[in-house]
Image (tube, rainbow, N blue to C red):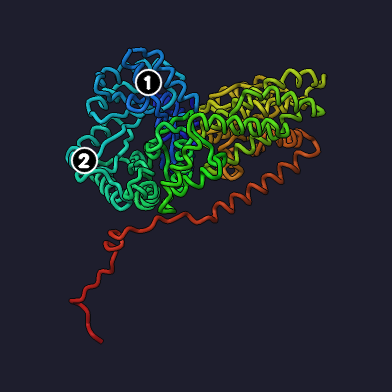
């Protein structure tokens, strides 16, 4: 026992050591000797982040990507969901929630506010059913209601830490504070509407004025953590034909910038479909408006949005004339922007849209097979993927070349669009499904063409705990297997202890970690620390959409003394693995990598942290205090 405790103390895990039932003075003496001279645990600097959870955690910090909140489990926004709840078809209603999560929603918004519904009973029943569905319950819940009783009932049903949508100052500050204190006790994050006693904020100035006031009350009077405050500065419909509404989108986008500048750590959300309400019935135009609006709002600080996770358009794929017309409206660039968009909208309505889509399909189906594969991946189209993959296989010398060539090229385009904010997670999930289908089609051909004989090496690969995405990992596995490496694939959501135990059991030569979402990064650091603690020396490879050379160098490599290498994409894995397992190349490759990462760390350390601007009130409080009574004129 004493030996184990000393190891924990040396690792910085312990502040106090003691004993309870069964220990004797000899036990305590041995433990005391074991930790003599060791320093107690130093509290780490924990990055500020909004930390939510269902069955799995969701941390939203400064470096997080846009968070999609699924909107279809809302009786006021989905006729289908309302009908299912009214008819008490809760099993089918759960399928709506499941579809949102599968399509990439990282939070689901649940609203039961309907005149003919018992909202409290419906909320309790639906949330209770969700608790028994792990594939839904893994994401945090946003309880959405204008009725405080419904909110409280809902909070008592959810597991983990959810969000309440919403509270505001429309009924006065006293009620606002009362509700906020109760939410603090329940441990929920909160959406705060830009709404006070005078009404909803509709200008940039009013939005920041109300948010500033609410922030001050919540942080100073209630003690609410600023990172758990999510402002909704009100998204209103544009292109209504009313001149006063022309700047609504710009006012929201500008307010995002103001909130991020003035209210540290607060997040920003909004109901995205509101902005396109003028074009209800014309889905192509509405989707274009959403894509353009999000593109600019996210760049100015919007952290999350209530959206239909399965129906988001890609900014770069919008027809140029439609995108330009929508930007004129969203950015209020032209006085006649609304009229021009209304005229153009008819071109994209109904059967005309179908004709345009058919014409576009006929066009892209005539392209070179490599471009067709890229198009299918970006658009998430599975209809022709096996046909096109077979054509590409016929043209390639080896089946693996289809993966390493056109398929990887297409996924790189998806990655670029995702990184630029022109694609969102639901669309990436669709792309991954297309890629998975193509790889599955090729696997029998790859298996048949593999060289028989001894393995070049053995690698354990896994998507780390907290992440369910596996397409990148799967591609790496296929590519390495084609090059005669033995792969032990542990799947997704794999805890550190299982990864390391398996690596020992199979005598692995390398370990590869994959992850798509931001929480994966912290778990990769944890795995590296555990490898060091358990005395591993084999190479550790890091890959996935949110990983980077900088994060690997600054956060991961310093926790593990063995070789740690960031691999940008699957096509580079073979070269990296070959170098790490080569008797002649390994030392030079590791030395060059470590030198490169040291340079990255130095450059990172030189970056000056962005100092938040001082508010006018703080500047006045810090004015020069001069005692004129004691001044003597010279």
Quadrant that contains the C terminus: bottom left
Viewer-nearest of discs 1 and 2: 1
Q: Position of residue 390 (x, y in %)?
A: 74, 23
Q: Position of residue 438 (x, y in %)?
A: 67, 24
In the displayed structure, 116 sits above or below 59; it is: above
Nearer to us in this view, 104 or 389: 389
Q: Within 10 angstroms of label 1, few (less than 14), some, or many (20 or more) residues?
A: many
Instruction: Give the mark nearest the N terminus, 1 or 2.
Output: 1
Residue visible at 52% across and 32% down? 352
Q: Quadrant of residue 129?
A: top left
Q: Which mark is residue 170?
A: 2
Q: Position of residue 286 (x, y in %)?
A: 44, 36
Q: Position of residue 454 (x, y in %)?
A: 81, 21
Q: Which mark is residue 23?
A: none
| Left or right: 86 as drawn, with respect to 253 | left
Element type where label 2 sits in the image: loop
**In 3D space, how far apart are the residues under numbered discs 1 and 2 (Cα atoms)?**
29 Å
Nearer to us in this view, 192 or 358: 358
Residue visible at 28% across and 46% down? 201
Tags 1 and 2 touching, CB below 8 Å: no
Q: Within 10 angstroms of label 2, few (less than 14), some, or many (20 or more) residues?
A: some
Residue visible at 64% across and 27% down? 435
Q: Quadrant of residue 266?
A: top left
Element type where label 1 sits in the image: helix
Q: Which mark is residue 81?
A: 1
Camera sees residue 40? no
């Amino acid at each position: 026992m004493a030996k184990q405790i000393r190891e924990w103390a040396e690792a910085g895990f312990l502040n106090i050591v003691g004993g309870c039932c069964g220990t004797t003075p000899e036990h305590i003496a041995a433990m005391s000797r074991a930790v003599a001279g060791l320093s107690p645990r130093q509290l780490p600097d924990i990055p500020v982040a909004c930390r939510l959870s269902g069955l799995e955690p969701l941390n939203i910090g400064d470096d997080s990507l846009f968070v999609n909140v699924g909107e279809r489990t809302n009786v006021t926004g989905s006729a289908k969901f309302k009908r299912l709840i009214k008819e008490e078809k809760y099993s089918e209603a759960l399928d709506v929630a499941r579809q949102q999560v599968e399509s990439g929603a990282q939070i689901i918004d649940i609203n039961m506010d309907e005149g003919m519904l018992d909202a409290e009973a419906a909320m309790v029943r639906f949330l209770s059913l969700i608790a028994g569905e792990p594939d839904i319950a893994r994401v945090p819940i946003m309880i959405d209601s204008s009725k405080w009783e419904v909110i409280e009932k809902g909070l008592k049903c959810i597991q983990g830490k959810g969000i309440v949508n919403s509270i505001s100052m429309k009924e006065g500050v006293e009620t606002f504070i009362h509700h906020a204190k109760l939410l603090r006790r329940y441990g929920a994050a909160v959406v705060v509407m830009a709404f006070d006693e005078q009404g909803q904020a509709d200008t940039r100035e009013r939005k920041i004025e109300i948010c500033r006031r609410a922030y001050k009350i919540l942080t100073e009077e209630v003690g609410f953590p600023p990172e758990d405050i999510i402002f909704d500065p009100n998204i209103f419909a544009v292109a209504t034909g009313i001149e006063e509404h022309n700047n609504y989108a710009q006012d929201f986008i500008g307010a995002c910038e103001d909130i991020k500048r003035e209210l540290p750590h607060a997040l920003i959300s909004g109901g995205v479909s509101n902005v396109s309400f003028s074009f209800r019935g014309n889905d192509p135009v509405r989707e274009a408006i959403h894509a353009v609006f999000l593109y600019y709002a996210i760049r100015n600080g919007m952290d999350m949005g209530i959206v239909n996770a399965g129906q988001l358009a890609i900014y770069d794929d919008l027809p140029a004339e439609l995108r330009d017309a929508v930007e004129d409206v969203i950015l209020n660039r032209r006085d006649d922007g609304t009229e021009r968009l209304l005229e153009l909208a008819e071109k994209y309505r109904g059967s005309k849209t179908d004709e345009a889509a058919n014409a576009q399909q006929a066009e892209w189906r005539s392209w070179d097979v490599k471009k067709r594969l890229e198009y299918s991946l970006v658009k998430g189209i599975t209809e022709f993927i096996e046909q096109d993959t077979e054509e590409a296989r016929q043209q390639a010398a080896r089946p693996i070349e289809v993966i390493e060539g056109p398929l990887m090229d297409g996924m790189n385009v998806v990655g670029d669009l995702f990184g630029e904010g022109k694609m969102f997670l639901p669309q990436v999930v669709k792309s991954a499904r297309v890629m998975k289908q193509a790889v599955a089609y090729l696997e029998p051909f790859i298996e048949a063409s593999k060289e028989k004989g001894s393995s070049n090496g053995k690698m354990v690969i896994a998507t780390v705990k907290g992440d369910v995405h596996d397409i990148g990992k799967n591609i790496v596995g296929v590519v390495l297997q084609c090059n005669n490496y033995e792969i032990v694939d542990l799947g997704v959501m794999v805890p550190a202890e299982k990864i390391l135990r398996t690596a020992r059991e199979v005598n692995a030569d390398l370990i590869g970690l994959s992850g798509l979402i931001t929480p994966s990064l912290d778990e990769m650091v944890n795995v590296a620390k555990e490898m060091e603690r358990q005395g591993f020396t084999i190479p550790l490879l890091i890959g996935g959409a949110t990983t980077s050379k900088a994060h690997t160098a600054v956060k991961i490599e310093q926790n593990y003394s063995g070789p740690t290498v960031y691999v940008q994409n699957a096509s580079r894995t073979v070269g990296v693995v070959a170098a790490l397992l080569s008797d002649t190349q390994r030392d030079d490759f590791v030395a060059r990598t470590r030198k490169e990462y040291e340079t990255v760390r130095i450059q990172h350390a030189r970056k000056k942290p962005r100092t938040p601007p001082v508010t006018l009130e703080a500047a006045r409080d810090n004015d020069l205090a001069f005692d004129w009574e004691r001044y003597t004129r010279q």
